[in-house]
Amino acid sequence: MNAVAQLLAPEDILLDLDVSTKQRVFEEVGRLFDRRHRLAQTLVVESLNARERLGSTGLGQGVAIPHARIKHLRQAVAAFVRLKLPIPFDAPDGKPVSGMLILLVPEQATEQHLQLLAEVAQMFCDRSFRDQIRNCVDTASVCKLFATWPLS
C-alpha cells in the first residue's frame, strides 16, 4: 500500500462538500482534523492559509494539494475532499478545483513531506485516477482507489 493510502481512512474523506470558497474548505477540514486527530481547527486553518499565501497549491486539472507543516504534530495526517461544485483556487491552468488532498506534516518532516507531495502529485496527474475519483460513490471506494494506485 502506498504512503498516502496509509494515511486515509473513510472518516478522513468528505464527499460532495457544499462550500464556495477555499476558506470554507479549510474550515471544514479543520473541523475534521480537530475531531479525528485533536488538532485545533484554528491552527489547521491558519497553517493552510499561511501556505496558500506563499502560492497556490492548485495543480491544475481541477485538483489541489493544500498542505502545511504543523508544530508538535507527531505524524503526517491527510484528508481527501471532493466538492459538490468546483471553486476558484488560483491553479496554474485557471480551472476551478473540485478535488483535493489536504496534507499536514510534522514541522521537521521535510523528506517525508516531499515524498508524500510527490506521490499525491503523481496520482492527480493520472487522468484515469482523476476521472475515477470524481465518480466514487462513497468514502470506502475513495480509500480503495488510493490504495490500489498506481492503476493497472
Image: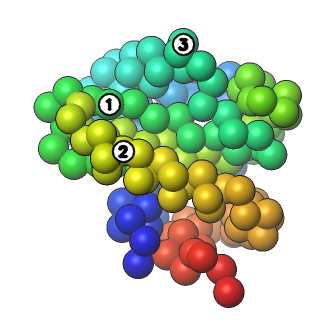
Mark seen at residue 113: 2
In this rendering, which labeled residue sits more in front, label 2 or label 3? 2
What amino acid is labelled 3 in the image? Answer: Arg
Q: Provide the residue designation for mark 1.
A: 69
Give me the residue at 47% from left, 21% from top.
51
Q: Earlier in the sequence, mark 2 or mark 3?
A: 3
Count neighbours of disc 2 (C-alpha within 10 A) and say few if under 14, some if 14 to 19, many if 20 or more.
Answer: some
Q: Nearer the viewer, residue 98 or 32?
A: 98
The residue most toward the bottom is 152
Mark seen at residue 53: 3
Give the spatial CA distance, label 1 vs label 2.
8 Å
Q: Secondary structure at mark 3?
A: helix
Does the rendering let one see residue 49? no
Give the spatial CA distance, label 2 vs label 3.
19 Å
What amino acid is labelled 2 in the image? Answer: His
Q: Earlier in the sequence, mark 1 or mark 2?
A: 1
